Amino acid sequence: MREVEQVPQLTAGWEDKASALTPEEGFLLSRIDGRTPWGTLRSIAGLPEERVDDCLEAWLRDGLIQLIESRKIVAVPVGELAVDSGLELPVEVQQRALEVERLLDGSYHELLGVNRDSDARSIKRSYFKLSRDFHPDRYFGRDVGPFGDLLDRIFKQVALAYELLMDPITRTELERSMSSAPSAPRVQNGQPQKFSKREWLARMRQQFKLPEEVLAERRLRARQLAESAQVAEHQCNWKEAGSCIRLAIAFDPWCDAYKQQFAAIQVEVNRLRAEELLREASGAWDSHSLSQALKLYEEVLHYRPADAEATDRAAQLCCELEEFDRAFEFAALACELQPEAAAYHLTRGRILRRNGRRERAVEALMTAQNLDPQDTRIRDELKKARQSPTRARGGKR
Amino acid sequence: MSRVIGIDLGTTNSCVAVIDGGKPVVIPNAGGYKTTPSMFAIAQDGKRLVGHLAKRQAITNAENTVFASKRLIGRRFDSEEVSRSAQLAPFSIVRGPNDDPRIDIEGKSFTCPEVAAIILREMKHVAEEYLGEPVTDAVLTVPAHFNDTQRQCTKDAGKIAGLNVLRIINEPTAAALAYGIGREVEEKIAVYDLGGGTFDISVVELGDGVVEVLATSGNTFLGGEDFDRLLVEHLLKEFESQEGIELGTDPMALQRLKDAAEKAKCDLSAMQTTEVNLPFIANDANGPRHLNLSIDRETLEGLVTDVLGQTLGCVDACLMDAGLTVEDVDHVVLVGGQTRMPLVQELVSEHFGQRPHRGVNPDEVVAVGACIQGSVLTENGGDVLLLDVTPLSLGIATFDGHFATLISRNSTVPVVKSHIFTTTRDQQEAVKIRVMQGEGEQAVENDLLGEFILNNIPRARKGEPEIEVAFDIDANGIVSVSARDLATQSEQSITVSARGTLSEEELEQIMVEHAEFELPKEK
Ligand SMILES: Nc1ncnc2c1ncn2[C@@H]1O[C@H](COP(=O)(O)OP(=O)(O)OP(=O)(O)O)[C@@H](O)[C@H]1O
Ligand SMILES: [Mg+2]
């Protein structure tokens, strides 16, 4: 077993020895920059750890890479803090501070006590809560002994975590690295890193700091991959195209053209995915799994937010499931997207009727009828609506 | 611990508040007014006068009456702001030994922190009279866009006045705190503060007992004084074209005009037209002349629209920094006397697409916020926590004269940020770290806060050493900077004790002098 701190570096003539690498291996290779330790490579390569170990061992044998000493930096001893009831700081707060101290070296998510599904609001809530507990102003002028430092450190780190998680860009980056490395260490050399968003992104990019020849090689590799992606595109093999271009970006993250190509491919991939989902959704509806169908339509809308038909379907499904508020929202949206479509006004009218809003239902259905006077469904629905009782009393007619 | 007062040291008016019986109370001065003019004068008989007493004799003693000195504090004598102030000030502004502006009246030279101290001491007296006990602890407010030097000068002023300044907070933040206390809702508010000398805009988020400043922006040299100046210039021109006499050189005439212009400006907030009558304003071979002009609201509005446009530019910049648009703002709170002008209210309503919130007193709310923060700090008041930001970016000068930001403006404090730098010459053994504050891309456009040298860098080719520079701002706004060579771990650091315009010795000496002054009480 290798020491995780050892740092692999590409050897001088590595290009000659790097024959036929698989894309995954290429990606791993692109991550070797003479700075990133073995242990980190294990977690950022997107490969099983054993595969990483095997590859690196093999390359080491072939003289593709060599190991260099990591510049090890001695951690500043934090000093063991202990709860002290003599301080003007409630013992519970001291205990909480010590608990949070352990989280300082973990992920930002853990520190804030949130997870990947947490929305901005709950992130803010926990940030506010932690601030109320640990902001130095809470203990202004009081004797908090050595805890003063700790409180200060906690607050600063919490504020940084909040900043990074509230920004969609940094949050995505963070969560992406989490998925390839569930326990990606954020601690380097025993000291938590203290970077702003911008520096942090710069850091991410810095991993590719390599000599010019190597960079040229990489760019070439990236270009080849982008070409393969194009070929795959022509064959409408979008999955293949997607993974090729993704690798190209890994090799040459500075080229915007690849990112555009990736975006274009992504559009296609999304389109395919949406179509697949649509098929599944109507299948689910046919087999009466209504809530499943609704979920699928919602997912479709995620990819195609302006799809009026899918919106209308979602509205109908919500109505069947008696979730009238949401039903109405979807229906209104569908009408907004395609105001000329009688069918969508029909859906809206039906939802309103079933929710006991007779007058508005009649109004919507009249709109529908004006748009398509021949449609018998609309006529029937209108009749029903006129006869229906209203939930809130007070219809004029 | 004795009670903590909050003082809003304004350009035109100052105000003091304290928590009394669990509630913030704005303290009236001996004359019964809740605000006191930020004016200081030396009368013919050598007596020192402050507040209303100074204001009352300003016209007959124009050369020895100081007003709006907040516009000078912490600036360099050569700055544009100082020369603009000097153009219209009837008192004389001279260059001090530290290149700071000083005020010469009655043959004595006063530094700006001293003048501020005289006003602060008056506010301290007002509080002591009311409370019947001595007061030393205070929270002071400054415009959000004040830089470190201006803040430090204000702190020095507090010291000279015999106050223990617990904290300096930003005026719009204080207003937000006063507005937000006890409100149980989550909302985002914009505080638009147009006072006598400065303009500030802050966007603040309230909720869960936290007041979080999202962003702040402003102009420390834009306020009611500029409105007055524009109106004075207008009146001068009118008078000159009617009578062929230039009034600009006569201090007494200028002071009368300024006074009349301010009054006319305030009148026009309620009326459509007003008269400016100044009999015997000048004299020439043909005998005495009287100034008698009528002004309507449109004329005044025409004069100030440009200035007001600038404030809206700041608003947009601030919203952008906060990552918000006007639609995200739930309420707009107006602060500062100048927001009483109808045009200001109209422009703000139009810009935000909503009527501004009424219900805070624009003259008092800042002092109230300051005293709330005082009680939060000392009683560890469980109700509310203020998360304030640093208004200006901090960074270092790079070798090619650029400014590299380390802590960007609107970062919540306390904060720590670090970045790796390297050498620019082969075999370089030392680097100079110049710590700066400001928004300019070029280092020279920004203020230098301090500098130090990191040496003992192991000899290497340029670009190889890695030097980590860390910036730290603590809750009191104290900046410290450390630089560490990652290879050798050799480290240098400094606390950038923000420098005011007074040296330590000068400050000591002035404190001794001022301790002896007992000011006459306001009648
Ligand atoms: N009714 C009014 N209409 C127009 N302007 C007014 C009115 N009342 C006061 N002002 C102006 O408001 C300004 C003073 O406002 P305020 O007292 O809020 O300023 P300040 O707090 O002393 O200054 P700053 O906060 O800029 O340091 C003066 O220029 C004054 O002329
Ligand atoms: Mg003010």
Image (spheres, rainbow, N blue to C red):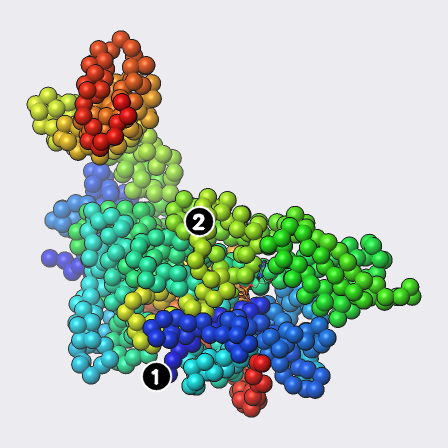
Q: Residue furthest top?
A: A374
Q: Nearer the viewer, residue A71 or B443?
A: B443
Residue type at numbered disc 2: Met
* Image spot of residue B19 (x, y percent): 38, 74
In the rendered structure, the residue with mark 1 lies on which chain? B
* Image spot of residue B334 (x, y percent): 48, 56
Side of B99 where B314 appears, left or right: left
Same chain? Circles 1 and 2: yes
Disc on res. B1: 1
Report helix, strand or loop for mark 2: helix
**Mark 2, other Cα within 10 Å: few <14 / some 14–19 / many ≥20:** few
Residue A259, compared with residue B410, is above or below; it is above
Residues at marks 1 and 2, CA–CA distance in whole angstroms:
42 Å
Q: Nearer the viewer, residue B416 or A67?
A: B416
* Image spot of residue A165 (x, y percent): 28, 52
- Residue placed at 23% from the left, 74% from the top? A78
- Residue placed at 79% from the left, 65% from the top? B279
Residue B56, compared with residue B185, is above or below; it is below
**Image-quadrant location for residue B294:** bottom right
In the rendered structure, the residue with mark 2 lies on which chain? B
Mark 1 vs 2: CB contact within 8 A: no
Q: Which image quarter is the C terminus of chain B in?
A: bottom right
Task: Evaluate whether residue A374 shows in this view.
Answer: yes
- Residue placed at 29% from the left, 28% from the top? A332
Report helix, strand or loop for mark 1: loop
Side of B405 where A48 appears, left or right: left
- Residue placed at 8% from the left, 24% from the top? A288
The residue that disc 2 covers is B320
Give the mark toward the camera: 1 or 2: 1
Task: Evaluate whether residue A62 shows in this view.
Answer: no
Q: Going from the N terminus, do you reach mark 1 or mark 2 first?
A: 1
Q: Residue furthest right?
A: B285
